[in-house]
Amino acid sequence: MKNENCIFCKIAAGEIPSATIYEDDDFRVILDIEPASKGHALILPKEHYANLYELPEELASKVLIVAKKVITSMTEIVGCDGYNVLQNNGEVAGQTVFHFHMHLIPRYKDDDVTIGWKPGKLTDVLKEQILSKMK
Ligand code: 5GP
Ligand code: ZN
């Protein structure tokens, strides 16, 4: 399944050139065009799924294996000190390209990458609200 208007479908299919650092039957991994840090890469499935909700379980289970492979070799190449592996779903969560992708962001001591939130508080009420509904 491809989406004609989707840039990541075209990149994943090789119709638009990209800096590809890994490829298999299911995924293409490319360097991000506006990297948060040196080595920032994106894992793209070759088929179109808008987000993690849509991604089939089989691919969802494979994507972390690809992430592990790529961050292991990239760490050797760029000599980073850590990694953020993250994935945005929905505009409110910061998603701007609506074809599932996983960010692999190398982290360096004293870099200026900001990925964060203000810690809240898990109250008993909130905890009960969620636990009572979660099956
Ligand atoms: P999102 O905000 O949807 O989680 O992330 C989209 C990412 O895709 C951004 O980091 C952005 O820089 C990257 N991106 C958008 N268009 C292109 C493109 O045409 N080529 C590449 N390599 N990266 C892109
Ligand atoms: Zn797509």
Image (cartoon, rainbow, N blue to C red):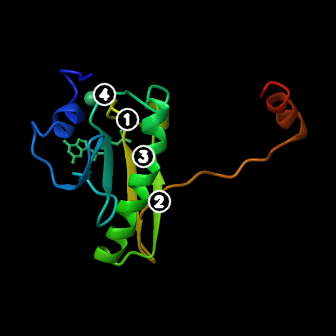
Name the residue at 35% across, 78% down: 79
SS for dot 2 = strand
Q: Position of residue 91 (x, y in %)?
A: 43, 30
Q: Are marks 4 and 1 in contact (CB under 8 Å)?
A: no
SS for dot 1 = loop
Name the residue at 55% across, 54% down: 116
Q: Which one is in front, 94 or 99?
A: 99
SS for dot 3 = helix
Q: Tell me the quarter of the image containing the C terminus.
A: top right
Q: Which one is in front, 59 or 17?
A: 59
Sequence-earlier tag: 3 or 1: 3
User: Amino acid under label 1?
Assistant: Phe
Residue position marked by numbered label 2 in the rendering? 84
User: Amino acid under label 3?
Assistant: Val
Sequence-earlier tag: 3 or 4: 4
Residue 113 horizontal side relative to residue 40, left or right: right
Sequence-earlier tag: 4 or 1: 4
Q: Is mark 2 within 8 Å of ligand 1?
A: no
Q: Position of residue 99 (x, y in %)?
A: 33, 32
Q: Are marks 2 and 4 in contact (CB under 8 Å)?
A: no
Where in the image, quadrant-wise, is ligand 2 located?
top left
Q: Determine crowd level at label 1: few under 14, some 14-19, many 20+ residues with C-alpha closer than 10 A.
A: many
SS for dot 4 = loop
Sequence-earlier tag: 1 or 2: 2
Residue position marked by numbered label 3 in the rendering? 63
Residue position marked by numbered label 4 in the rendering? 48
Q: Position of residue 106 (x, y in %)?
A: 39, 66
